[in-house]
């Protein structure tokens, strides 16, 4: 998320020399949360150079496994990938933490997810390595976490890495795989993202084996210094996640919205759309940032007529971003749907994983843009998203799966790339000429110097687009014969809520009952399978088994999806279902002292921190979505208590919003409605 100025940590006692010395010896890289991922060309070149040749299939259990660890009892596809590693992995739970304390061993915490390319690389290089595994097993308690199942754990330790990076001034960012080292009590003291297996594997970087050996030595020789580092890092991380003290007595401020609009203008890429453009670093990865785009659409609807000059600027940011994203390789022109992000300014080459939450939110974004200006290409993009999700990401029962991997056969993008010869073998004559012209096959290869990721030069008119349909279908049929990227078949409550809203919004805007029916089917699946006898939401369901307490975002996004169906249909059952989940959310997550909602429920397992996440990132914060839900419930039920809770939720973020309103554009959408209501 964009910041108008650097967030400086409060001055604490400096971290002990131990960690600073460690970090000065190597450079980290990995699957970035925002901007630190290696560009596709570089990452694939490095993989080809350094990845060992191993039979990863046997490691994942297709042959008789040589090793089996505690992850074999888990249901997460990501954890099951590691169930037959020689590393003796454990899941994150109370028993594992007790084991570390009773044995007085350091914890190696590795957090990733199924579609993370560099998570797979580190597994192949380090976690399948017998020598490395033996050392880890003897000296550490090794915990593997699926960040999508346990975002609470991921959030705390990712923030601790960010704090560590700021304090040591090493210039690094966060990302996945997240590799953190903790004391037996779970306090972080050192970490990074991806590490190569051995010294010299990737340039001058220190290898993972050397790192863990030195950490073991530090724990044995200077334990008190390690503990002091951990205490300091934990203290600062707590302060960062707990946030600023809110002003619950003051009104929400309209200046938050105008200031955010100006900040977005400053960071907008005027030529290629999107945000975070840096002219000195055109290869900086670029993300869709749907929360920013939804904020712009909301601002245009609410204020565009009164402020035409600002509205023109907001429209340029919204429509240019939508257009350029849909032209580039970020969008899958054959199969529909968006990849996670672009490794360049131009939306040209994606990081090839596909995430449900991106496609759910972008279906809503493009539908909202169409409401403002009904351009046919916006409608085509929504159709492509939803057709992809129904074809490849929907369970037979109607719930939505989580993700598709970036790689197949161990190579990122292999499923999606083409050689010119492959295309020429499938198309001929005018069909080939037309496809090559518009999808840039007549130009130099755009991926790894020899492949093509199809992308458009310019937006096609309807007639030309239709002429190219048969060519796209031929290529899609051929692509479907290739080894498919791994499907993560977890059904996550919050992500399903986003996709339910995407279908419902599209159904309403385009008057398409089939889209609304898909939203209803998914919602009924969730209400029947993710809600327990006490009315609590479960975080995840895999193979028909629901587990883990839901987080605030699960409740808020599911309510958002249900209310989107109500907005599309007017059917009372969806408001009734939303009210029940809202009541449970209020019961479990409310903060009576400072307003708003905690990230975890009151009876959740005790972690280092009970945070209140306000900032929107690639997904909106639960607090932001909760505020807009409450306002909608107030409107349709006439119950003023909902409006009062919404106002208090917005004010609970005021401590941060006064300084950095742009961190929560979805909360600003609620603020806009609150201010409009106060004027009535």
Image: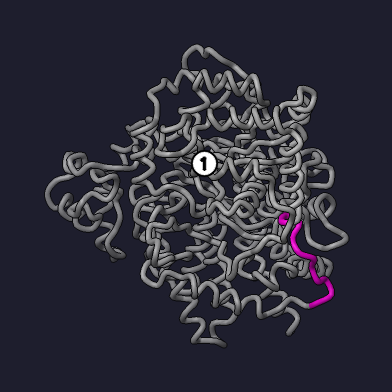
Looking at the picture, tell me which residue is in the foreground, 569 or 153.
Answer: 153
**Residue at left offset 58%, top offset 72%:** 298
**Could you classify mark 1 by the number of other residues whose Cα lies within 10 Å: few (under 14), some (14-19), or many (20 or more)?**
few
* Magenta span: chief secondary structure: loop
**Residue at left offset 51%, top offset 52%:** 358
Residue 153, image x and y in percent? 69, 42
User: Toward which corner of the image does residue 80 lie, by quadrant?
Assistant: top right
User: Toward which corner of the image does residue 1 lie, by quadrant?
Assistant: bottom right
Task: Report if residue 577 is visible in the image.
Answer: no
Q: Residue lying furthest right in this view? A: 593
Residue bearing mark 1: 25
**Residue at left offset 63%, top offset 38%:** 180
Q: Where, quadrant-wise, is the C terminus in this rendering? A: bottom right
Residue 344 falls left or right of residue 497? left
Magenta stretch holds residue 414: no
Residue 97, image x and y in percent? 76, 30
Indicate whether 673 appears above or below 285: below
């Amino acid at each position: 998320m964009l910041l108008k100025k650097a967030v400086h940590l409060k001055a604490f006692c400096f971290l002990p020399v131990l960690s600073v010395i460690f970090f000065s010896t190597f450079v980290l890289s990995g699957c970035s949360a925002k901007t630190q991922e290696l560009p596709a060309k570089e990452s694939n070149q490095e993989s080809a150079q350094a990845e060992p040749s191993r039979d990863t299939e046997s490691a994942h259990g297709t042959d008789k496994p040589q090793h089996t660890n505690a992850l074999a009892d888990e249901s997460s596809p990501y954890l099951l990938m590691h169930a037959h590693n020689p590393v003796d992995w454990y899941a994150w739970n109370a028993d594992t933490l007790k084991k570390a304390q009773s044995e007085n061993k350091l914890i190696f915490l590795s957090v990733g997810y199924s579609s993370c390319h560099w998570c797979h690389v580190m597994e192949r290089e380090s976690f399948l390595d017998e020598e490395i595994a033996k050392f880890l097993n003897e000296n550490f308690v090794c915990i593997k976490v699926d960040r999508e199942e346990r975002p609470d754990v991921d959030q705390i330790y990712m923030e601790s890495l960010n704090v560590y990076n700021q304090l040591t001034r090493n210039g690094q960012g966060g990302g996945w795989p997240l590799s953190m080292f903790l004391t037996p009590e779970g306090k972080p003291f050192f970490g990074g993202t991806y590490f190569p297996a051995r010294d010299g594997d990737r340039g001058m970087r220190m290898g993972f084996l050397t790192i863990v050996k030195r950490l073991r030595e530090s724990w044995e020789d200077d334990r008190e210094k390690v503990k002091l580092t951990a205490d300091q890092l934990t203290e600062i991380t707590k302060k960062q996640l707990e946030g600023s003290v809110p002003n619950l007595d003051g009104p929400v401020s309209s200046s938050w919205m105008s200031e955010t609009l100006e900040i977005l203008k400053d960071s907008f890429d005027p030529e290629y759309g999107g945000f975070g453009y840096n002219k000195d670093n055109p290869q900086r990865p670029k993300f869709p940032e749907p929360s920013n785009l939804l904020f712009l659409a909301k601002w245009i609807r609410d204020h565009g007529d009164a402020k035409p000059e600002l509205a023109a600027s907001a429209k340029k940011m919204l429509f240019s971003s939508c257009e350029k994203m849909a032209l580039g390789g970020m969008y899958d022109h054959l199969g529909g749907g968006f990849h996670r992000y672009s490794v360049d300014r131009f939306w040209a080459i994606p990081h090839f994983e596909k995430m449900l939450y991106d496609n759910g939110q972008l279906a809503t974004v493009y539908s909202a843009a169409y409401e403002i200006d009904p351009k046919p290409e916006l409608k085509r993009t929504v159709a492509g998203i939803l057709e992809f999700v129904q074809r490849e990401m929907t369970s037979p029962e109607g719930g939505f799966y989580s993700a598709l991997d970036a790689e197949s056969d161990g190579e990122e993008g292999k499923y999606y790339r083409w050689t010119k010869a492959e295309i020429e073998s499938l198309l001929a004559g005018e069909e080939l000429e037309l496809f090559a012209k518009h999808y840039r096959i007549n130009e130099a290869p755009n991926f790894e110097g020899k492949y093509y990721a199809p992308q458009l030069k310019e937006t096609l008119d309807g007639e030309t687009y239709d002429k190219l349909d048969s060519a796209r279908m031929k290529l899609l049929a051929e692509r479907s014969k290739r080894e498919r990227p791994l499907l993560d078949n977890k059904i996550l409550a919050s992500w399903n809520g986003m996709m339910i809203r995407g279908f419902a919004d599209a159904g309403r805007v385009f008057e398409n009952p089939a889209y609304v029916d898909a939203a209803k089917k998914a919602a009924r699946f969730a209400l029947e399978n993710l809600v327990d006898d006490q009315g609590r939401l479960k975080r995840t369901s895999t193979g028909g088994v629901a587990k883990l307490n839901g987080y605030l975002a699960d409740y808020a996004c599911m309510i958002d999806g249900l209310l989107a169906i109500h907005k599309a249909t007017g059917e009372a059952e969806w408001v009734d279902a939303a009210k029940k989940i809202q009541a449970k959310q209020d019961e479990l997550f409310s903060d009576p002292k400072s307003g708003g909602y905690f990230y975890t429920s009151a009876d959740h397992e005790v972690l280092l921190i009970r945070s209140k996440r306000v900032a929107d990132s690639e997904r909106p914060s639960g607090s932001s979505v909760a505020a807009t839900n409450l306002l909608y419930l107030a409107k349709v039920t006439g119950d003023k208590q909902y409006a009062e809770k919404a106002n208090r939720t917005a004010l609970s973020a005021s401590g941060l919003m006064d300084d950095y309103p742009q961190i929560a554009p979805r909360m600003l959408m609620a603020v806009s409605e609150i201010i409009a209501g106060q004027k009535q």
